[in-house]
Image (spheres, grey):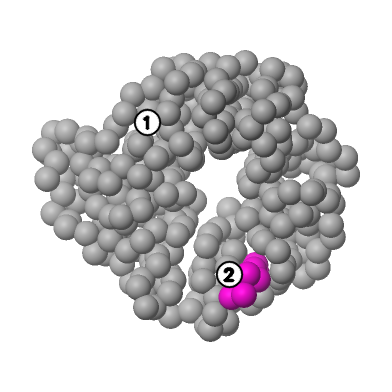
Amino acid sequence: MINSAEAGWINIKKDFPDSLAIDPTNSQILYYVASIPYKGTSLFKSKDGGKSWKLINTKGLSSSSSIFYIYIDPLNVKTFYAICSEGNYAYALYKSTDTGITWQNIYSDPNNIAIFAIDKLNDKILFVGGGFNLLKSVNGGKSWKEISTYGIYLTDIIINPKNTNIIYVTDNDYTLGLWKTSNGGKTWAQLVNGLPNYGDARVGAIVADPVNINIIYIYVHSVSSKENYDGLYKSVNGGVSWIKIASNLDWGYVTLVIDPINTHTIYAGTDNGVYKSTNTGTTWHQMNTGLTDVDIFHVFGIDPQNPQILYAGTYNKGLFKYIPGSSHLDLLLLDGQ
């Protein structure tokens, strides 16, 4: 139990976390994909910030489908996209136009689908990839065109929200695969100036400042841990050059999020819990009070309307919500669902 005058984490869903999506127009509405033993993945909805949940009876997904990631269209919150496995190592991208009830397969890939993004200025423009290529749709997923081919799996994608021709992608190459296009994917350049693009350095996470679009952070880690690559790197010029701003973080696998109102504040969901920086990533401190499992899975998000509230999915204890003090005393009555 968390003291009502203190901030801390509470468990709001005990099922294994696969994905979390927050309605950008009403952050009390949450969609949570959970793995349930002997039942596969299930999609839940909460209308009250995680106090209660209702199972969505989905239609149109194949019997072998398991949802990995779910996304809400920022311009039409009734439209969802989901990356799913289809059994036998096949993957598919599904679309729903009725808040996750009915789904339609709009793209399949025999190799892998790991990344997806929506153009925030024109939601007909979509990007999908992860196998050995990146594809683009300009009609909401009705058709796709390959815009780049890689020899290795893609791992992340971010789109400049003010100039959506600028896109960054990362891959899991050990020579630091970080790429940028400024023309919507027609040409790409690898970003290396100031980064350790040798040995086994790998980009573990990438995030862009939502206000100053030229500021980007990446977390670099070394798989073998024999080299001193690990740390947080920052660019203030759209990736042209980088400086290392924090070392010896010992984070393992990481998800980074930035406070959309106070962009000096950055959060990291890691293998060792949650960390917070209030000085643009230079120094960090743990914030694990109430977090009974510190092994954060890839589910880690921030409330877009009240960015003091965070969500973290853990390997063993499900979904947690960070409560910023006594203003949310009512939630302390929860014992997890």
Image: 185 above or below 256: below
Q: Is mark 1 on a helix, strand or loop?
A: strand
The residue mark sitting in front, 2 or 1, is 2
In the figure, is residue 63 to the left or right of 13? right
Type of amino acid at the residue the image marks with label 2 = Ser
Image: 232 above or below 66: above
Report x, y in % for residue 169.
Answer: 70, 41
- Residue 104 lies in magenta, yes or no? no
Which range of residues does the magenta coloring cover?
87-94
Disc on res. 169: none
How packed is label 2: few (under 14 Cα within 10 Å), some, or many (20 or more)? many
Disc on res. 275: 1
Residue 124 versus residue 223: which sits nearer the camera?
Answer: 223
Type of amino acid at the residue the image marks with label 1 = Tyr
- Residue 89 lies in magenta, yes or no? yes
Q: Single out the residue that lies furthest toward the right.
A: 186
Report x, y in % for residue 245.
Answer: 53, 16
Taking the spot 64% from the left edge, 53% from the top edge, the residue there is 115
In the figure, is residue 303 to the left or right of 167? left
Q: Name the residue under label 2.
A: 85
Q: Which of marks 2 and 1 is nearer the N terminus?
A: 2
